[in-house]
Amino acid sequence: MTAQADSEWKGLVISGFSRLPEFLPIEDLSADELDWRPQNIANSIGWTVWHLIRVLDGELHALSGEEQVWIKEKWYQQFGRKADPEDTGFGHSADDVGAFTSPPPSEFSGYLVATLTNTEAYLRSLSAADLERELKEPYDPPPTVGTRIVSVLADCHQHAGEISYIRGLLAAQGTKL
């Protein structure tokens, strides 16, 4: 792969991740709005934003071998949670989601920016050959670093769409937006 092609794929993937803040407009939401759920079995905006960032932090740092921003920078404290690297929202029940209490929007933004900064540094460190490295996971065929990165990027954008949808439902309830 040429240096230009290497720079192009990195630029595209980094751009995909760097757009996340603009897709997560939550600065104008109150604590009640962040924690509102359309149904008792549904996710709230706050929980979904937290989950999106936790997955990004957890998955990309698992690839890089570095400690998660969640632990390293003690973001768990701002969210009133334990320093558990496995606490990403996977496996959470409806009751777990309902028990989630959002911090102020600035805490979400700070954690997202810190995670994206580390994500970009990791992506810039990769070579095209790194993308082909197979992960030691029980799938057939095993995923590669490249497929995992694309999977995480897609997951983040899907959750951003979910957050927009929940905001629309919230607006339909007559709540200020």
Image (cartoon, grey):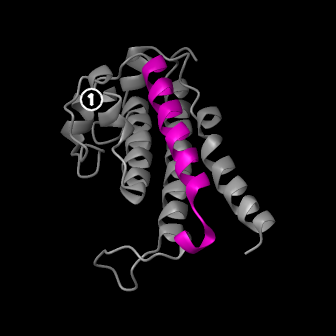
In the image, residue 173 sits, relative to residue 66, either above or below, namely: above
129 magenta-colored: yes
In the image, residue 44 sits, relative to residue 161, either above or below, namely: above
Residue range in magenta is: 105-130
Q: Which residue lies under the disc numbered 1? A: 100
Residue at left offset 43%, top offset 75%:
143
The part of the image, by quadrant, that contains residue 25 is top right
Report the residue that reaches farthest toward the bottom: 140
Residue 39 shows in the view: no
Residue at left offset 57%, top offset 74%:
129
- Foreground: 44 or 6? 6
125 magenta-colored: yes
Pinpoint residue 51: horizontal percent, then vertical percent: 38, 41
Report the residue that reaches farthest toward the right: 4
In the picture, the quarter occupied by the C terminus is top right
In the image, residue 83 sits, relative to residue 65, either above or below, namely: above
The kind of secondary structure the magenta stretch mainly shows is helix
- Foreground: 33 or 128? 128
For the image, the number of numbered tags is: 1
Residue 91 shows in the view: yes
Amino acid type assigned to the residue bearing label 1 in the image: Phe
Pinpoint residue 165: horizontal percent, then vertical percent: 54, 40
Residue at left offset 53%, top offset 76%:
132
In the picture, the quarter occupied by the N terminus is bottom right
Pinpoint residue 19: horizontal percent, then vertical percent: 65, 41
Q: Is residue 163 left or right of residue 51?
A: right
Residue at left offset 60%, top offset 66%:
127
Of helix, strand and loop, which one carries label 1?
Answer: loop
Pinpoint residue 27: horizontal percent, then vertical percent: 55, 18
